[in-house]
Image (spheres, rainbow, N blue to C red):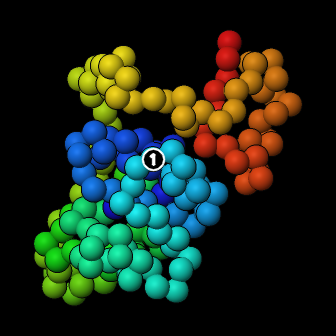
Amino acid sequence: MVIGAGPIGLATIKFAKIKQAKVAVMDINEERLGFCKTNLDLTGLINAKSNKVVDDIRDAFEGDLPTVVMDATGNPQSMRNTFDYVAFGGKIVFIGLFQGDFTFFDPLFHRKEITLMASRNALGVDFDQIITLVEEGKIDTDLWITHRMAFQDLPEKFESLLLPESKVIKAIVEL
């Protein structure tokens, strides 16, 4: 399961799908979940604001919890919640970066025998692989690009890109 349907989460979903994983996505933004429903073939869509999130996750995975939960939010509350969402013996991968201290309930971590991982910076070989996947048509980045603008328009339009109503997923500045 991928938590966060922003650009990093969408890329994570795509890479998991390339590996033929069964993938569900969780987000608090219904529009992002709608985007995923329309454009991605996913096992489930879960609204993190639901009163029954764990039940919704189980529904997406045929009664089970996911064996891998990847959090792309960088939000400490979301990251804490991953411990409730992952299956016994599962893995949590923190992809999104949170600039601060982070704590979790240690007895749950031990009881579930969770493996906790963090993403790392990419290496040159990773970029070669991604470029190959794009060239082979296995990754279509056009799907994520919702806004384009000329470089000279950037000072005037930049602040509007930060507004939720602009519905930006990824903006490209063209030179």
Q: 68 or 52: which is nearer to us?
A: 52
Residue 88 lies, in percent from the top left, at 17, 77
Residue 74 visible here:
no
Residue 82 falls in image quadrant = bottom left
The residue depicted at 60 percent of the width and 33 percent of the height is 145
Query: Which quadrant holds residue 159?
Result: top right
What residue do we see at 38% from left, 83% from top? Answer: 55
> Is 146 displayed left or right of 57 in the figure?
right
Q: What element carries label 1?
A: loop
Residue visible at 62% across and 63% down in the picture: 30
Furthest residue toward right: 156
**Given the image, on which type of amino acid does mark 1 rest?**
Leu
Question: What residue sits 80% from the left and 18% below the top?
Answer: 152
49 on left or right of 159: left
- Residue 82 is left or right of residue 158, and the answer is left
What is the x, y in percent for residue 35?
Answer: 57, 50
Against 113, residue 170 (above or below) is: above
Q: Of 42 and 113, which appears nearest the observer?
A: 42
Q: Residue 29 appears at what percent x and percent y?
A: 61, 62
Q: Mark 1 points at which residue?
A: 40
Point out the image quarter for the C terminus: top right
The N terminus lies in quadrant: bottom left
